[in-house]
Amino acid sequence: MPHHTPDIAALIGSRICHDLISPVGAVANGMELLQLSGDGDRPEVTLISDSAANANARIRLFRLAFGIASEDQLTATDEIRGILSAIYAGGRVLLDWQASGSVPRREARAVTLAILCAEHALPFGGRLSVKRTGGHWKVSAETPRLRADPALWDILAGAQPAPDVPPSAVQFLLLPHHLSEMGRLCTTRQTQDVLELSF
């Protein structure tokens, strides 16, 4: 019996993240050793160290968003917040995280995909808010320079995706599928400065 395509994609995502996390971690460890030896004050060392930390956080986020999610696995919301804080530290996106406790790994995957959808509307920076009330999530992007492609956001409402969805927007294809598996629907709302999705 053939495997479902999203399962194959998740296996590929898990494999890529697994293989990349070790060498990126080794670079970060090497930078720490340079800093301990007294050579870490140079700007190029700081740049490499910051880049390695950001890459490490991105890989961990992608592993949550695109990797395999088993039924009984749990993920701490503090882990997701920590990953996002490392990615957005000192950048143009401000993070407002209002969630606590642990959630099933499948729910964590949906949340991270939703975050990537919201982030897509903030190419020039802004405020990214994540709130959890009971079992419901609300993720919003806020900025005076909001850039939301209607064709992508219509996918979340059940519209047929265009054949030329770019790789940077693959999260818009995956989120409705995973929410459907969880028995949930995604709703969106947009004003001039705020774009919000809930499930």
Image: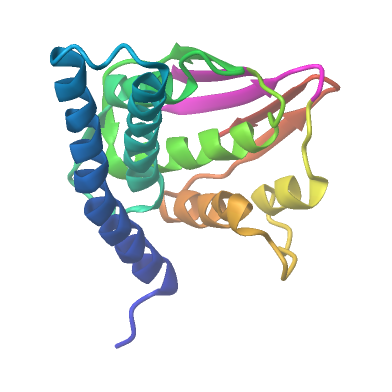
The quarter of the picture where the N terminus appears is: bottom left
Q: Is residue 108 above or below residue 143?
A: below
Q: Nearer the viewer, residue 198 or 63?
A: 63
Q: Is residue 185 left or right of residue 51?
A: right
Residue 134 appears in the rendering: no
- Residue 155 percent across, percent down from the top left: 69, 53
Q: Residue at x 38, y 37 (%)?
A: 55
Which residue does the image show at 21% across and 16% down from the upper left?
Answer: 35
Give the image location of residue 94, x and y in percent: 56, 13
Residue 161 seen in render: yes
Query: Closer to the camera, 155 or 30?
Result: 30
The residue sitting at the bottom extreme is: 1
Task: Report the front residue among 88 and 148.
Answer: 88
- Occupied quadrant, residue 189: top right
Look at the image and say whether residue 132 sits in the magenta stretch.
yes
Q: Is residue 157 above or below residue 87?
A: below
Give how far across and how far down residue 108 sits, in percent. 36, 37
For residue 163: magenta?
no
Looking at the picture, tell me which residue is in the foreground, 101 or 85.
85
Which residue is the extreme one toward the right? 192
Q: Is residue 85 left or right of residue 185?
A: left
Displayed quadrant of residue 167 = bottom right
Image spot of residue 110 (x, y percent): 44, 42
Q: Is residue 114 above or below residue 8?
A: above
The residue at 40%/45% (across/down) is 65
Q: How many marks?
A: 0
- In which quadrant of the rendered image does the C terminus lie? top right
For the stretch drawn in magenta, what is the main secondary structure?
A: strand
Q: Which residues are magenta?
A: 127-145
